Image (cartoon, coloured by chain):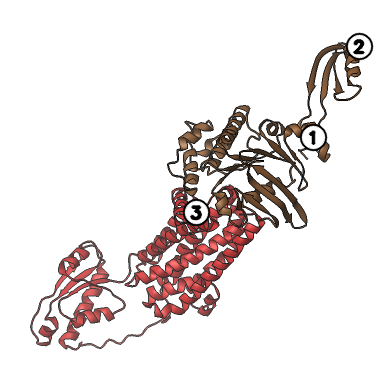
Amino acid sequence: MSLYRVGVLLYRELVQGPKNIIFIFAVVVPLVLSLALALLFGTLFSGKPRLGIVDEGSSRLSQSAAAMTSIRLTIFATQVELEAATRRGAIDMGVVVPADFDAQLAAGQPTTMIAYVWGESLLKDRALLSTALVAWTRQIAGQELPVTLTTTILGDTVALPWQDRILPLLILMSVVFGAMMLPASSLVSEKQHRTLTALAITPATTADVYLAKGLLGVGLSTVMALVVLALNGALNERTGLVAGVLLLGAIFSAELGIVMGVLVKDVNSLFATIKAIGLLLYAPALIALFPDIPQWIARIFPTYYLVQPVIEIVQHNARLADIAGLLGVLLALIAVTGAILAGLTRRNYRLGTV
Amino acid sequence: MPIPSIIAEQLVYRYGSLLAVDQISFQVASGEIFGFLGPNGAGKSTTVKMLTGQLRPQAGQIKILGIDVARHPKQVQARIGVCFELTNLYETMSGVENLHLFARLFGVRGFDADALLRRVGLDGRGKDKVEGYSKGMKQRLMVARALVNQPDVLFLDEPTEGLDPTSAQAIRHVIREEQARGATIFLTTHDMHEADLLCDRVAFLDRGTIVALDTPHTLKQQYGERMVYVEVLAPDGTLQRREVMLDRADTPAEVAALLQGEQVVTLHSAEATLEDIFIRITGRGLAS
């Protein structure tokens, strides 16, 4: 294998790729779906209120804010950064907590807290954040609420919000469609136009060709999946880990795509195959849509091990150790699919087909 | 014979129960134009696939430029050029882009695409997309692509089939130039006239075996019969054709009788074509 030749072939794929309808679909479909679903279910424009804090001491207010899951908290180092973030709408409200804030309150002394409010923030977000700030301040001051509020939750108390249920589908669409379909369609197209035979008698190896096609799919789909997660406000401080898992998922999908490209003879057969196996590929996401279905069924499908680690990280703030088992299965799937691909390549050489 | 560029020994390839190539052996000398002739299904494509490292022989051995093809196909492919019968260019790319892609894959430094396009008569069309080329232009670009790495051995599969006379002539000219440069040329063709024009030696392949291998001249001497074609004016005013075999004891008498007894309009001597010889050896034509 030659990295130089892989680069030459990848450059061709990059230049010619955007002319391919699959390439356009791989970029456009996840974005359009994300935006459409966000509009439909209100995930994009009515998410959690976003609060920014500059904590000059170690106030209990920051700890209370961090503990509240219904608020998205960002800690800033300086007042300048906080003001800039509020001005550009990255947060709905930003507060500067003075160094002696807790001590002053405990001593019953009046104190000042600077607050910035983004002018375009929703009224409900401002109201929620203001109310929360007042409640935390009273807690620190040692004041008891004059009213005891007794709440009763009605309806399904364990149901996931729709935005959480749809996220696996969006991730799978981004990763599987791009990483699988791009190499598969490119390979089949080269077979149909016989250009693969022309490449086969150059010093470029089959591995060079497969790697170039796979890299395009892996790169594009990983980026698109990250964009989709960002659009859905699902990225947290473990973005690096998410990107790594998405990369592995994209590698697995690309391998599946290349295997399909090797086995399938023409584009029509490729689309027929995709239709036939589509349900299997998206099954984990479809099962996640309906919590009444036993969720263990999703574990039967290989793509579960691609999407579930991502969900664990973005929805449950899982660390690498928490998803190690799932990643182990994903790595095993990558190894098995790679072995199948190597076997098919050897068979093709023996049979004189590409 | 000079040092062979191609050595094929006892090659065998079978597709299931069909024996496509049956223990064929031949050698092609360095700088030689070697014609590989045979009808469809004779085993030509399978042999070429084995020679170019696309297919592993089930038995036998191939050495190209002294390198074992089955063991080191990529080493061999770096030093050969292949022009396929069917067009396999990147149609959405320009001619220059196609050539540059393959030049980079072959690791050619300082590659001059325009000079190569000029050689095949495509100068001025290099920046056009291949999908807008005529069949002849595409074929010339395929030949140009096979030359990007200045190959030591050039495999050409039906390079002039279905082309207009100008395009065919341009390709024949390039083939002779490549031979003059020192390249060995392995030419697969149905066109016996072209093989006769270009090839130093030809091999006739039939049902997976080589049934004859020699220079066209020797084959004609060995298997062909010289003829005299005579056109005579019949009493009703129509032209009639007579054929007289040469090199027979009664030939002089037969010719004399014709000249004395008939009103001879034209008289041509002709030697057997390679196709005649192929039919004579195999009992069937190349089109079958």
Which of the two residues, A334 or A20, is positioned nearer the viewer here? A334
Residue A106 lies in quadrant: bottom left
Chain under disc 3? A
| Disc 1 from disc 2: Cα separation | 32 Å
Q: Is residue B201 left or right of residue B235?
A: left
Residue B5: tell me if it is visible: yes
| Helix, strand or loop under label 2 | helix
Which of the two residues, B62 or B188, is positioned nearer the viewer here? B62
Q: Amino acid at mark 1?
A: Ile
Q: Quadrant of the N terminus of chain B?
A: top right
Residue A231 percent coordinates (x, y): 36, 63
Compared with A322, A76 (above or below) is: above
Residue B162 lies in quadrant: top right
Mark 2 vs mark 3: tell me if same chain: no
Name the residue rendered at 13%, 81% in the picture: A101
Cβ–Cβ below 8 Å for labels 1 and 3? no
**Residue marked by disc 1:** B277
Compared with B191, B228 (above or below) is: above
Residue B190 percent coordinates (x, y): 71, 37
Which one of the lettered chains is coloured brown? B
Between disc 1 and disc 3, the foreground one is: 1
Which one of the lettered chains is coloured red? A
The circle on residue A22 is: 3
The circle on residue B261 is: 2
